[in-house]
Image: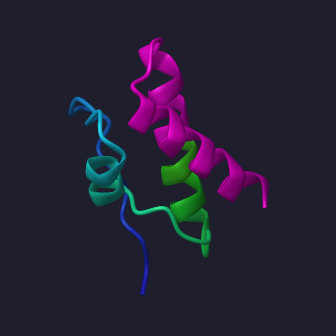
Amino acid sequence: MGSTRISGKEKLPGKFEDLMLVLPPRAIADEVHYENTVEMIDRLMAIGRLTKGQSLYLETLVQLVQA
C-alpha cells in the first residue's frame, strides 16, 4: 500500500489532534511518507509563531524523521 502526497495549499490547523488528521504521525515506511513528513515540517517551520499543538506536532515529526 503506497502513500499519497499531501497538498501544501491549505492552512494548517492549530490543534495537535487536527494536524494528526492531515498527516498522522507514524513510523516512516517509504520515500513518499518521508517526503510528506519533511514537507509538513517545512510548512510548520514557515509559519513562524506556532500554537502549542503545532509545536508539539512539529517536535513529534522531527523525532520520527531523525529515528
The relative height of residue 54 versus residue 19 in the rendered view (above or below) is: above
Query: Is 62 placed left or right of 37 in the picture?
Result: right
Q: Is residue 30 left or right of residue 20?
A: right
Viewer-side residue, 32 vs 22: 22
Where is residue 25? Give x, y as percent. 49, 62
The structure residue drawn at horizontal position 61% and vertical position 76%, both measured from the top left corner, is: 29
| Residue 59 belongs to magenta span | yes
What residue do we see at 53% from left, 30% from top?
A: 42
- Main SS category, magenta section: helix
Looking at the image, which residue sits at the far bottom? 1
Q: In the rendered view, would you say 21 is above or below 30? A: above
The count of marks equals 0
Q: Residue furthest top?
A: 48
Q: Quadrant of the N terminus?
A: bottom left
Residue 60, horizontal then vertical, whole percent: 59, 50
x and y, in percent, of residue 11 in the image: 23, 29
Position of 38 with respect to 21 (left or right) is right
Considering every residue shown, the one lying at the far front of the view is 52
Q: How is the image coloured?
A: rainbow
- Residue 54 is drawn in which quadrant? top left
Q: Residue at x 67, y 58 (%)?
A: 64
- The quarter of the picture where the C terminus appears is bottom right
Q: Residue at x 40, y 63 (%)?
A: 24
State the image coordinates of residue 57 (x, y, percent, origin top left).
49, 44
Give the farthest residue toward the right: 67
The magenta-colored residue range is: 40-67
